[in-house]
Image (cartoon, helix red, strand yellow):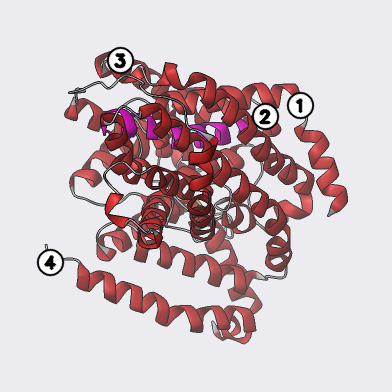
Amino acid sequence: MLDQFLAGFAMAMRLDTFVLMGAGLFGGMLVGALPGFTTLMAMAILLPISFFLDPIVGIPFLLGVYKGGIFGGSIPAILVSMPGTGAAVATSRDGYALTKQGKSRKALDMALFSSVFGDTASDIFTIFMIFPIAYLVMQFGPPELFAVLLLSLVIIAATSGSSPVKSLIMMAVGLWLSFIGTDPLGGVERFTFGLFDLKSGIPLLPMLIGVFAIPEIAAVVIRNEKVQQLAALMGERLTRKEFKASFRTICRSTVIGTGIGIIPGLGQVVAAMMGYSAAKNASDQPETFGEGNLEGVAAAEAANNAVNGPTMVPLLTLGIPGDNVTAILLGAFVAQGLRPGPQLFEEQGATVFAILIAMVFANLMFLAIGYLSIPFFSRLVRIKTSVLVPVVIMFAFAGAYVFRSDTFDLLMLVAFGVFGLIAKAGKFDVMPMVMGFILGPPMEYAFGQTIAMGNGTTLAFLFDERLAALGILTATPVIGFLLWRRMRSVPSE
């Protein structure tokens, strides 16, 4: 493992990697700082750029967009109480109150330093933990892999969206979509309806851009939000004493965010809220939270950025994305020929280390770029959406087309864009559908291998394997309880 680490370190030390990471960080902050635009939209639109780059350059570029976008969402949250991302909702509680007190610069500095600390600490944790976990996963056979993927899908359905029933329906749709094309085991065409373009299955990139970016763009147009009060960047910079006073809170939120990042289906929003609540409960003056407390900004930002690194653990070891953004990252890995899973570490261990090491260096660039460009990003809230939306739409269609240069992909983009709009109108979360589409093929293949190992007659072999049986027997009641509790908490529609 040490040899792979050293080889990965050497691979990561490329000038073009650092240049593209810097561009990704700046682009992510730029989009996150625009009210109404999200990190998810930025990732979906910029995803095709990574396809034309070396994996050691393209993946870090997207990771830069990811990291920069999460922090960028805190800028409008603090200045005008309009969170650029869902993860910045908790930040706006104290951030905007500080702005009204003339301390917006302190709030933005605290958000930046807390974000960098939480992100860096969680990335280092990821580097140390990912290979031991990968080694454990390498011991999995087809039964264990099938059990893990199946249970992951059910857990995601149980924790996503507002209704478990709707989430399960969307997951079933995603699994059905993954079956379209040619059977990987039997070589038989399925659900192609005689269309030659569907023989190879539904293209992933148009789906991702369609269901994620198009509804976001439509939401920006429909809301047509205007900044009612633009608070200029005001006040002095954050002092060392003020940062030190919040350091315990930052460490606590980093631990919370790191733990949440490992669990698929939770993500930054949950981490930010839990970090904020934990800081408020531990404070000697909880009544000051929401009234302009720097610890509130620190708690939310450290927690939501600490999620970034650990989400790579289930993504790389099992191919299970933790949220919508990492689902897009998975698409980038697959397009680069790096299929996440146990085999990735056997075949491309040095490449994995190079990407993880680049994540750590990205945080140092994150600190420098953020610190110098905060005044610039704070002015972006003035830009009208009527100017930005046509540009974003152009990038969406261009990105869907350039990867395969196939007009069929544009039709798929429009179709999934309409599907995403309908799903959003009906309050159906598309996350389970995308997870079902991505995890469906490897789960089907593992299932077929399991059946073959059991002589094609029974699934008893699945329960003969101790790890698979243990996973199913221990997780089933937990999942059942989650579903029962969620369904009780959701009012009938």
Q: Which residue is mark 3?
A: 383
User: Callout 1 environment at 10 Å: few (<14), some (14 to 19), or many (20+)?
Assistant: few
Instruction: Judge depth for marks 1 and 3 and give the one in front.
Output: 3
Residue at 54 percent across and 72 percent down: it is 147
The residue to which callout 4 is attached is: 492
Q: Separation of disc 1 and disc 3 at Cα?
A: 35 Å
Q: Is residue 429 magenta?
A: no
Query: From which residue to which does the magenta span run?
Result: 59-83
- Which of the two discs, 2 and 1, labels the residue nearer the N terminus? 1
Dot placed on the residue nearer the N-terminal end, 3 or 2: 2
Name the spot of residue 483 as percent of width and height, x first.
Answer: 31, 72
Nearest to the observer: residue 110 or residue 443: 110
In the rendered view, does 131 fall on the left or right side of 272? Answer: right
**Disc 3 marks which amino acid?**
Ile
Question: Marks 4 and 3, Cα distance to the nearest angstrom?
Answer: 41 Å
Which of label 4 and label 1 is nearer to you? 1
Q: CA distance from mark 2 to mark 1?
A: 8 Å
The residue lying toward the viewer, choosing from 292 and 224, is 292
Could you say which disc has been placed on residue 14 in the image?
Answer: 1
Q: Residue at x 59, y 25 (%)?
A: 368
Residue 241 vs 313, above or below: the answer is above
Amino acid at circle 2 = Val
Label 2, on which residue?
57
> Eyeballing the image, is 454 above or below 227?
below
Label 3 SS: loop
- Tell me residue 113's x, y (percent): 53, 37
The picture quadrant where one finds residue 240 is: top right
- Marks 2 and 4, the one that precedes in the sequence: 2
Badge 4 or badge 1: first in the primary sequence? 1
Upstream in sequence: badge 4 or badge 3: 3
